[in-house]
Amino acid sequence: MRGEFVGSLNRFVSGSASVVDFQEWLLANLQSIMESGDSDLMEAADELDADLVQLGEALLDEATLFTRAMLWIEKLQTIPLRVVAQGASAASATTVAGSNAGETTTLAVEYPLPTNRDLRVNLTFV
């Protein structure tokens, strides 16, 4: 669903879809977005839906909506990556944020995606 949402936003910001086209797409897919469980996607849909209402009431201009859409595209194309190391030995502890043996260390890394595809990553540390 995230990829479809970003694709719809990309069509809007590239000019191949109008504001009305994006609004119709969002309204038609809002229930699926809310059922996706993707908190960033739900937040984006909620905020952009509110922006569209404000645009209709002339409280927001199209340039501001465009800018906000671009920011959401960037955010939604970023992968939150969490690496967890448990029971690291003294040798590997220095490579994983200097943790001590038996401790759990969590590192958070964000990497922007070059495409609109969903990506599943499986990392194993030995």
Image (spheres, helix red, strand yellow):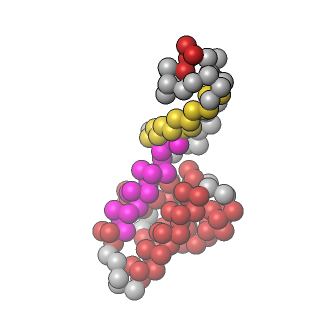
Q: Is residue 110 magenta?
A: no
In the depicted structure, whether residue 101 falls above or below residue 72: above
* Residue 9 shows up from this direction: yes
Total number of numbered discs in the rendering: 0
Q: In which quadrant of the rendered view does residue 87 lie? A: top right
Instruction: Write the start and end of the magenta stretch as one range.
Output: 65-80
Main SS of the magenta part reads helix
Q: In the drawing, does residue 70 fall left or right of residue 1?
A: left
User: Quarter-wise, where is residue 61 in the image?
Assistant: bottom left
Screen quadrant of the N terminus: bottom right
Point out residue 84 in the picture as x, y percentages from the top left corner.
61, 32
Image height of 106 relative to 41, above or below? above
Q: How far across and how far down the image is residue 81, in percent?
A: 54, 38
Rendered residue at 59%/43% (across/down): 118
Report if residue 79 lies within the magenta region.
yes
Which one is nearer the viewer's eye here, 40 or 69?
40
- The residue positioned farthest toward the top in the image shown: 91
Look at 47% across and 40% down and name the residue there.
110
User: From the viewer's perspective, is 30 left or right of 107?
Assistant: right
Quadrant the C terminus occupies: top right
Relative to the observer, which residue lies in front, 25 or 99? 99
Q: Is residue 93 left or right of residue 87?
A: left
Q: Residue at x 47, y 69 (%)?
A: 48
Task: Report the residue that reaches farthest toward the bottom.
Answer: 57
Q: Can you give x and y, in whole percent of width and height, for residue 9 in the image?
A: 46, 59
| Residue at image point 38% right, 63% down | 68
Residue 29: name its quadrant.
Answer: bottom right
Q: Is residue 21 visible?
A: no
In the displayed orientation, state which residue is furthest to the right.
35
The image position of residue 17, as x and y in percent, is: 44, 63
